[in-house]
Image: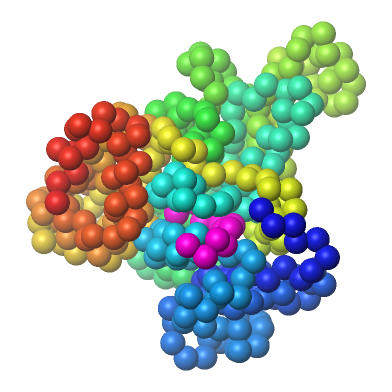
Amino acid sequence: MKNNFGKLIRVGIVGTGGISRGLAKLIARRKDMVISKILTRRKGVIEDIGVNQEYITNDAQRILELSDVLVVSTGDPIYSTQIIELAFTYGVPVVTMDADTQVLTGSYLSKRGVITEANGDQPGVLASLNQEVIQMGFKPLVYGNIKGFLNQNPSLEDMLYWAQKQGYSLSSVTSFTDGTKLQIEQALVANGLGVDLAKRGMIGYETNDFQEGAFALAHEAQNLKKVLSDYIISKESPPGVFITATHQEDLAPELKTYKLGDGPFYLLYKPTHLCFFEIPNTILNLLHRDEILLDNGSVPSASVATIAKRRLEAGTFIEKGIGSMDVRGEAMMIADDPNHVPVGLMSNVRVKRNVEPGQLITFDDVEIPDSLAYVAWKETLTNVVDPSIVVDLIKK
């Protein structure tokens, strides 16, 4: 990659949601970076963007002509996949804060250009913490996310209330509440760090004691003889990430001296994930050190399946799966059911036959519109399961 020392880094931003807006404000005040353009599908003036409207564009080619790096955060993996592939035709590397896209098409995209997930959201923070932990000689057993609250089937009334109160979109608040975002994040961690899931949906240990929950998951990992990507539910715990690990026995006294307890399990955590505030450092590490902090792996093992929240009658139209009142996402090992529909593909989908609440939705149940993301998923699937059966699994 080109050495960018000594010149302003031209950063193109895709999306105008909270992450993109915050990043634009941050970069506008830096001395080593400048905004090239901000790509959006919205028309007209965008209120509260925080920077001059002259940065806004609807022209994808224009932003790529002007950018040294592209930051993508849209929450729409089908759209993001198109933009990222286009960026690669211009030789522009991509930083995502978009686990949705990474889990659905990141493996396909990583073979076509330079792409990394950013530090700042839970997967990137876990990847960064992992680098520190490994260098100190720890052996991770659990890569954990911390969730304060979970309701897999919230009401529309509640979601509208919290969306307005917190200033997020309805779909974002819903995906946070029903666990879809969490499931996507931990699937990315499993793929990017090469670890396993204990079961579909993960364990999700509920506890009032942070350390107790982290250690309980470590016991599960040892019993399964696996390293796990998982989470705890705890209102009392910090809103960050953790790694539960072991270390060599002869260093146990020293670790106790440094307040890590008696072992054999040690809890290492970061109590914050500062989202867009941490993206600039990812950009610098990518451009100056060629560092890929985290991607979805060339051959992923985990995906996020679509689970029905309610009875879906044949003919039901689903506009968007992530953050939907109709379906939610649940992490699973791809090989357990290759016919599942990734929740990221559930946009503008029509249900072909009745689906019951809690049912895993397969490609036999829905009509999926053509898209590059769909093509990418089929290609990825041929690398995970026997390619001869993919045609039978996914019918067009």
Q: Is residue 165 left or right of residue 200?
A: right
Quarter residue 258 falls in: top right
Residue 321 shows up from this direction: no
Q: Position of residue 240 (x, y in %)?
A: 66, 46
Residue located 35% across and 65% down the image: 156
Q: Is residue 107 above or below residue 206?
A: below
Residue 301, percent from left and from top? 41, 32
In the displayed structure, does residue 272 sit left or right of residue 319? right
The residue that appears at 56% across and 51% down in the rendered structure is 114
Q: Residue furthest top?
A: 250
Question: Is residue 126 found left or right of 88 in the rendered image?
Answer: right
Q: Which residues are magenta?
A: 89-102
Q: How is the image coloured?
A: rainbow
Q: Is residue 93 magenta?
A: yes
Say which residue appears at 63% left-offset and 45% top-offset.
Answer: 292
Q: Is residue 287 left or right of residue 259?
A: left
> x%, y% of residue 136?
79, 26
Residue at 72% across, 68% down: 9
Numbered-mark total: 0
- Residue 261 visible in the shown view: yes
As drawn, 299 above or below 38: above
Is residue 78 highlighted in magenta? no
Q: Where does the image place residue 288, in percent across and percent down from the top left?
A: 75, 53
